[in-house]
Image (cartoon, rainbow, N blue to C red):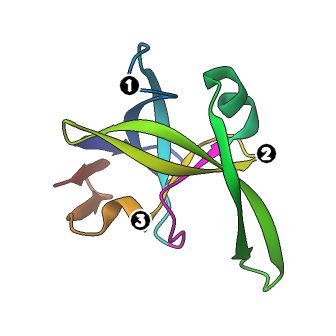
Amino acid sequence: MNGLVDEFGRALLALKIRSTGKEAPLEITVWVDTAFNGELVVPRAMIESLGLEQSGGIRARLADGNEVTLESFTCNLDWFGIQRNVEVIANNGQLPLLGIGLLIGHRLVVDYKNLTVSVE
């Protein structure tokens, strides 16, 4: 899987997600966030447009030390050719975030000289 480093230094990848395995996937651009130990964080508006089902809430500790409860949803992700159900955390951000929950067992290379990203 290949991506790019944008003009702000963000490592970006394109992923295909859907609410179930039946409808056409939506391609989204995600920002690789190695400080996030979950799978995906997706803006609430995108979650609503995809019609993702809420699966519950999870307790999380934010970077500032505060503990909060975050809404979680389930989506179907095309991950290296395999359809995988993953947990999605809702937020009010601009870009979806991909966390290390999906990167474990893979090799991530961010090449700032050539502005490329690869996950193997």
**Magenta residues?**
35-42
Disc on res. 13 = none
Q: Residue furthest top?
A: 24
Q: Which residue is mark 2?
A: 92
Residue placed under numbered mark 3 in the picture:
101
Relative image position of residue 70 (x, y in whole percent):
76, 60
Q: For the residues carrying marks 3 and 2, which lies nearer the camera in this image?
A: 3
In the image, residue 28 sits, relative to residue 59, either above or below, namely above
Q: Residue at x 19, y 36 (%)?
A: 81
Q: Nearer the viewer, residue 89 or 62?
A: 89
**Structural distance between the alpha carbons of marks 1 and 3:** 21 Å
Which residue position holds label 1? 21
Q: Is residue 47 left or right of residue 109?
A: right
Asked whether 64 or 18 is in front, the reply is 18
Judged from this view, the residue extending furthest toward the bottom is 65
Q: Earlier in the sequence, mark 3 or mark 2?
A: 2
Q: Amino acid at mark 1?
A: Gly
Reply above or below: 85 against 101.
above
- Which element type, helix, strand or loop, lies under badge 1? loop
